[in-house]
Image (spheres, helix red, strand yellow):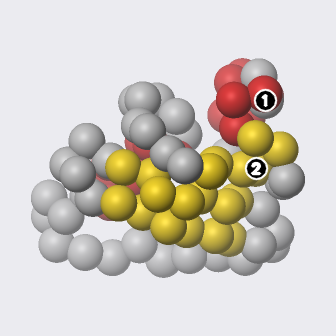
């Protein structure tokens, strides 16, 4: 499960997002709308400020990155 509150992407878009276990999403949008930027931020490949970012109830900063990225 993901819970993200006030994630600010480099393009200044603010994201609030939650996804329950065994759920799926479909990202659609025009070229340049920020789909890849969002996924890159979700994988924590770029630093983005956020208010709350949890993965299965754990704060993202306490989960080892290699463990997190192997599951995302």
Find residue 56 and report its horizontal and vertical position in percent: 84, 54
Residue 37 higher or lower than 70, as above or below: below
Q: Return the residue at label 1.
A: 63
* Label 2 SS: strand
Disc 2: CA contacts within 10 A as few (<14), some (14-19) or many (>=20)? some
Q: Residue furthest front?
A: 51
Tell me which label, 2 or 1, sits earlier in the chain: 2
Q: Residue at x 55, y 68 (%)?
A: 17
Find residue 20 and report its horizontal and vertical position in percent: 76, 73
Q: Which mark is residue 50?
A: none
Q: Is residue 72 left or right of residue 5?
A: right
Q: Which mark is residue 55?
A: 2
Residue 26 higher or lower than 57, as above or below: below
Q: Residue at x 14, y 58 (%)?
A: 32
Q: Label 2 vs label 1: CA separation?
A: 9 Å
Q: Residue at x 85, y 53 (%)?
A: 57
Closer-to-camera residue (55/21): 55
Q: Residue at x 72, y 50 (%)?
A: 54
Disc 1: CA contacts within 10 A as few (<14), some (14-19) or many (>=20)? few
Tell whether label 1 touches label 2 (CB within 8 Å).
yes
């Amino acid at each position: 499960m993901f819970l993200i509150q006030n994630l600010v992407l480099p393009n200044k878009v603010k994201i609030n997002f939650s996804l329950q276990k065994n759920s799926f999403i479909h990202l659609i949008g025009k070229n340049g709308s920020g789909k890849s930027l969002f996924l890159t931020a979700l994988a924590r490949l770029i630093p983005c400020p956020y208010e709350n970012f949890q993965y299965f109830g754990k704060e993202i900063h306490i989960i080892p990155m290699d463990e997190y990225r192997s599951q995302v």
